Image (cartoon, rainbow, N blue to C red):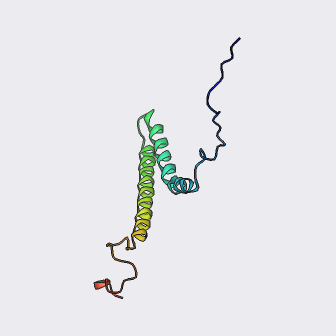
């Protein structure tokens, strides 16, 4: 009797290269408020699908949309601030950081 065996090593979830890296986990953690807000919006939309939308359903969806927009704005602002710091400029008006010569009308 011939036995059939695999020709490659078994793949396990415990291999170090398959685990998420710290930077990836940090990125996921930063995006979690947005993910949670989008899940809440989806839940509100699913609830309103099965029946005619009541005033409560409309308010629930509107609040969930506002939370999604606020979470997106916060995430975009955070990445813009980080990008500005990486480039050595202020996130506002692209001014160089700590440059008194570039202060112009903003003062010292």
Q: Residue furthest bottom?
A: 108
Horizontal placement of 18 versus 81: left or right? right
Residue sitting at 49 percent across and 42 percent down?
43
Task: Name the one closer to the observer, 40 or 57.
Answer: 40
Q: Quadrant of the N terminus?
A: top right
Q: How many marks?
A: 0
Vertical comparison of 14 with 63: above or below: above
Residue sitting at 31 percent across and 83 percent down?
102
Q: Where residue 99 sits in the image (x, y, percent)?
A: 36, 83
Residue sitting at 44 percent across and 38 percent down?
48
Task: Name the one closer to the observer, 78 or 37.
Answer: 78
Q: Where residue 27 sits in the image (x, y, percent)?
A: 51, 55
Q: Residue furthest left?
A: 105
Vertical comparison of 2 with 102: above or below: above
Residue sitting at 66 percent across and 22 percent down?
5
Q: Where residue 98 sits in the image (x, y, percent)?
A: 40, 82
Q: Quadrant of the C terminus?
A: bottom left
Vertical comparison of 56 with 108: above or below: above
Residue 15: image quadrant is top right
Task: Name the one closer to the observer, 3 or 41.
Answer: 3
Q: Residue furthest top?
A: 1
Horizontal placement of 1 versus 24: left or right? right
Task: Name the one closer to the observer, 106 or 25.
Answer: 25
Vertical comparison of 53 with 60: above or below: above
């Amino acid at each position: 009797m011939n036995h059939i065996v695999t020709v490659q090593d078994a793949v396990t979830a415990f291999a170090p290269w398959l685990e998420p890296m710290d930077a990836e986990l940090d990125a996921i953690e930063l995006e979690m408020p947005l993910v949670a807000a989008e899940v809440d919006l989806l839940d509100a939309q699913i609830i309103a699908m099965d029946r005619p939308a009541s005033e409560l359903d409309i308010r629930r969806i509107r609040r969930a949309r506002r939370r999604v927009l606020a979470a997106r704005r916060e995430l975009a602002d955070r990445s813009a601030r980080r990008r500005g710091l990486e480039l050595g400029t202020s996130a506002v008006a692209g001014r160089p950081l700590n440059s008194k010569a570039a202060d112009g009308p903003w003062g010292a």
